Amino acid sequence: MGQEWAIVGPLLPLELERWARPTKDNCLLLNGRLYVLRVGYAWQDMHERYGKWNSVYVRFRRWAEQDVWDALLETLVDWGLINFLVLCFDGFD
């Protein structure tokens, strides 16, 4: 894993104690999410190397509901690692 994961990984919640089936690691699922964003595919067309598309989607939604993505972006901005002014969000005016 690279330098980026060393920074981002600890900011993501651990999901080791979920009652359902064991989860894939956060790095793999985050990469799956970024893949979907980058290529513009539907979730169902996500490459299988990232795990089951539905598992990636469910974790993405759960983290969105828990404000994990907002907290991650705020932390990266606070640390000076990204410039919030140049971020582009699809669907925002």
Image (tube, rainbow, N blue to C red):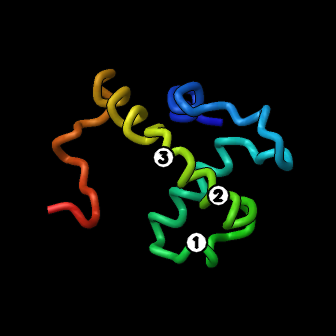
Label 1, secondary structure: give it: helix
Residue 7 horizontal side relative to residue 73, left or right: right
- Residue that appears at 55% across and 53% down: 60
Label 3, secondary structure: give it: helix
User: Which label number is shown at residue 53?
Assistant: none
Q: Alpha-carbon distance for marks 3 and 2?
A: 14 Å
User: Which sits earlier in the primary sequence, circle 3 or circle 2?
Assistant: 2
Percent x, y of residue 90: 28, 64
Percent x, y of residue 65: 48, 46
The residue identified by callout 3 is 65
- Residue that appears at 36% across and 30% down: 76
The residue identified by callout 1 is 43
- Residue that appears at 47% across and 48% down: 64
Q: Which one is in front, 20 or 77? A: 20
Residue 86 horizontal side relative to residue 43, left or right: left
Q: Which one is in front, 35 or 23? A: 23
- Tag 1 and tag 2, C-beta contact below 8 Å: yes
Q: Against 71, is 48 above or below? A: below
- Residue that appears at 83% across and 47% down: 20
Q: Alpha-carbon distance for marks 1 and 2?
A: 8 Å
Percent x, y of residue 77: 29, 30
* Residue most extreme to the right: 21
* Badge 2 amino acid: Val
The residue identified by callout 2 is 56
User: Which sits earlier in the primary sequence, circle 3 or circle 1?
Assistant: 1
* Badge 1 amino acid: Trp
